Image (cartoon, helix red, strand yellow):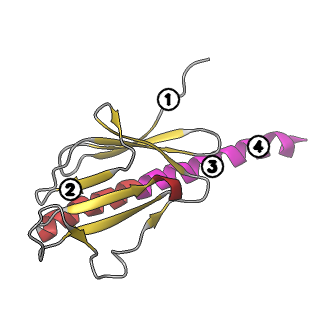
Amino acid sequence: MLAGVVFPRLRGSVRATGLDEAAQRLAAFIRFARAESVRRALKIQLTIHSPRATCSLALQNTESTAPEDFTTFDDPLLDQELALPQGVRIGRVRQAQQTLRAPIIVFNPDGVSEPYSIELTDQSNRVFLVEIGPWLDQVTVSRKKEPAP
């Protein structure tokens, strides 16, 4: 009988851990993109593919005259998409108070970007926020508080 009481709680905490892990992985991916933009002295574009729960990076095309033209890295590791774990969904992506339909975040060569907030959710509707501040080291992860009943 004790197992019946403990198991559902453990299962819920495993899902929360998966959601937390997904948020931490996304934050690390964002930190990498920012650092890479500074290292290469080029813009890096982070595209969020909400329906697939993936993200990808693109590099400013130095052979183009258009400043917002991006290309692949020509590196199999860097050109891979970051896939979030099964059951984790990308919710709203916001810039200031505006929800973006096709979120694309650009990191400038100095590491600066606009501030963004990315919601990740799971099957239990728990929500984690990955918040991107305007400066180089400003990427935080937090669990969104559930409203009181």
Q: Nearer the viewer, residue 111 or 43?
A: 43
Residue 14 percent across, percent down from the top left: 64, 51
Question: Marks 2 and 4, how far apart in space?
Answer: 42 Å
> Residue 71 falls in which quadrant of the image?
bottom left
Mark 3–mark 4 CB contact (< 8 Å): no
Indicate which disc, 2 or 3, sits on the residue closer to the N terminus: 3
Q: Residue at x 84, y 46 (%)?
A: 3
Question: Which of the two discs, 2 and 4, sits closer to the camera?
Answer: 2
Amino acid on which the number 3 mark rests in the picture: Arg
Bounds of the magenta segment: 1-25
Q: Nearer the viewer, residue 31 or 51?
A: 51
Q: Secondary structure at mark 2?
A: strand
Return the residue at label 4. Answer: 8
Q: Residue at x 13, y 66 (%)?
A: 42
> Residue 75 falls in which quadrant of the image?
bottom left
Indicate which disc, 3 or 4, sits on the residue closer to the N terminus: 4
Indicate which disc, 2 or 4, sits on the residue closer to the N terminus: 4
Question: Marks 1 and 3, how far apart in space?
Answer: 16 Å
Question: Which of the two discs, 2 and 1, sits closer to the camera?
Answer: 2
Q: Nearer the viewer, residue 3 or 33?
A: 33
Q: Residue at x 63, y 49 (%)?
A: 15
Return the residue at label 1. Answer: 145
Amino acid on which the number 1 mark rests in the picture: Lys
Q: Residues within 10 Å of mark 1 (few under 14, many from 20)?
A: few
Return the residue at label 2. Answer: 107
Question: Which of the two discs, 2 and 3, sits closer to the camera?
Answer: 2
